[in-house]
Image: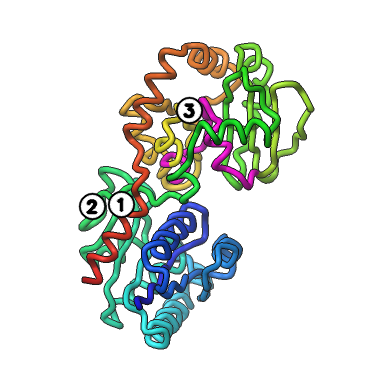
């Protein structure tokens, strides 16, 4: 029996690939022992136990980027976290550490090195994070979700996707989604989503442009996330949701999408062949623009900056796209050409290679 320690978390971009790989391990090795290493503050604290996996936590330790009181104590706290993971590896007789980036990963990488346990890394973003840049120095087994990711030893495996996405029957999903969301079978559906944390400009622009989009013959499934101050106006062909716990159905029914460009979202839309308009998150290291680059370059998506995504842009650019069925069909083909629905299995094979 093999014992796997899967480290990562914080955001959905780290947690979802981790869970997809965990599911693939469980499917291939029903007797495997799987332990997930995360923090109490991240999404993993809720999602990992809900998926039926054991969660072990360490202190959340962001790398200090400027002088502060926490920066002064960072070194000692980080060493303590590494020691905790070394003890966990010894206690559970861990055979391999698999890291997905995020706050729990860096201590796990150093602990794996100290414990002389094989280390495997998956980088979900086109622009690698600090933890994975560190970890890639210690292992030749580095899988990436996007071509061209600059990470030592990187090999392309694609994005590990949830089984419900990898195996989605879109025809069946459309019928179920229309019933669940109250959609019209005679209209194409525009999915608009800003992610779990929401996206103010994206949401506001779609909300204010809904009459124009509906007049173009479409209906809108609008998932706004947290902190959006509008409620569903109850209008025909417009459906507003704060949260969607059947996201595979929302993706399956989509004929086009307007979305942030998180790595998971880009990978899921590409795998399902959904033409997309990506509005990258305007704060941070610019990773979302890189995530969308391959699909945009292939012709499967359009990228518009957050500041430019306005009702005026919707009228001048989005509406002509939505009414051009030939272009949408071509975009769907190109989007699907960039998808990698076997990412979970490819990552599992990389892990087994490290073990052998």
Residue 277 — which label? 3
**Proximity of marks 2 and 1: CB atoms separated by less than 8 Å:** yes
| Callout in the foreground (3, 2) | 2
Residue at 52% across, 73% down: 54
| Quadrant housing residue 107 | bottom left
**Compared with residue 185, is residue 153 higher up or lower down, i.e. above or below?**
below
**Which mark sits nearer the N-terminus, 1 or 3?**
1
Give the residue number, with chain letter if any, for mark 2. 155
Q: Which mark is residue 144?
A: 1
Q: Which residue is at 37% across, 32% downward? A: 336
Residue drawn at x 39%, y 64% as measured from the top left = 25
Of mark 2 and mark 1, the one earlier in the sequence is 1
Marks 3 and 2, how far apart in space? Answer: 28 Å
Q: In this view, does 174 lie above or below 35?
A: above
Q: Distance between the residues labelled 2 and 1?
A: 6 Å
Q: Earlier in the sequence, mark 3 or mark 2?
A: 2
Coordinates of residue 166 in the picture (x, y in percent): 43, 45
- Where does the image place residue 279, in percent across and percent down from the top left? 50, 32
Q: What stretch is highlighted in magenta?
A: 244-267
């Amino acid at each position: 029996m093999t014992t796997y320690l899967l480290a990562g978390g914080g955001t959905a971009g780290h947690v979802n690939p981790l869970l997809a790989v965990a599911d693939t391990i469980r499917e291939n090795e029903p007797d495997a022992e799987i332990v997930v290493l995360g923090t109490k503050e991240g999404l993993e604290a809720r999602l990992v136990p809900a998926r039926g996996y054991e969660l072990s936590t360490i202190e959340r330790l962001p790398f200090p980027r400027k002088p502060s009181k926490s920066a002064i104590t960072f070194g000692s706290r980080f060493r303590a976290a590494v020691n905790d993971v070394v003890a966990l590896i010894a206690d559970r007789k861990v055979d391999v550490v698999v890291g997905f980036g995020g706050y729990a990963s860096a201590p796990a990488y150093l602990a794996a090195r100290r414990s002389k346990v094989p280390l495997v890394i998956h980088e979900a973003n086109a622009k690698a994070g600090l933890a994975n840049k560190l970890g890639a120095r210690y292992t030749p087994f580095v899988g990436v979700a996007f071509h061209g990711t600059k990470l030592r030893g990187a090999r392309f495996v694609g994005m590990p996707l949830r089984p419900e996405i990898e195996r989605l029957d879109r025809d069946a999903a459309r019928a179920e989604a229309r019933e669940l969301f109250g959609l019209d079978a005679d209209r194409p559906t525009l999915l608009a989503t800003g992610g779990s944390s929401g996206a103010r400009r994206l949401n506001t622009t779609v909300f204010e442009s809904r009459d124009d989009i509906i007049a173009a013959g479409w209906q809108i499934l609008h998932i706004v996330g947290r902190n959006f101050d509008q409620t569903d106006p109850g209008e025909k062909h417009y459906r507003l949701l704060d949260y969607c716990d059947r996201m595979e159905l929302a993706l399956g029914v989509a004929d086009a999408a307007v979305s942030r460009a998180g790595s998971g979202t880009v990978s899921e839309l590409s795998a399902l062949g959904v033409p997309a308009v990506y509005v990258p998150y305007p704060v941070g290291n610019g990773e979302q623009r890189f995530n969308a680059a391959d699909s945009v370059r292939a012709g499967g998506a359009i990228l518009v900056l957050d500041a430019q995504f306005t009702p005026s842009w919707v009228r001048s650019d989005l509406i002509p796209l939505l009414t051009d069925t030939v272009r949408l069909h071509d975009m769907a083909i190109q989007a699907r050409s960039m998808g990698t629905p076997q990412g979970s299995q490819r990552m599992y094979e990389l892990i087994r290679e490290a073990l052998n």
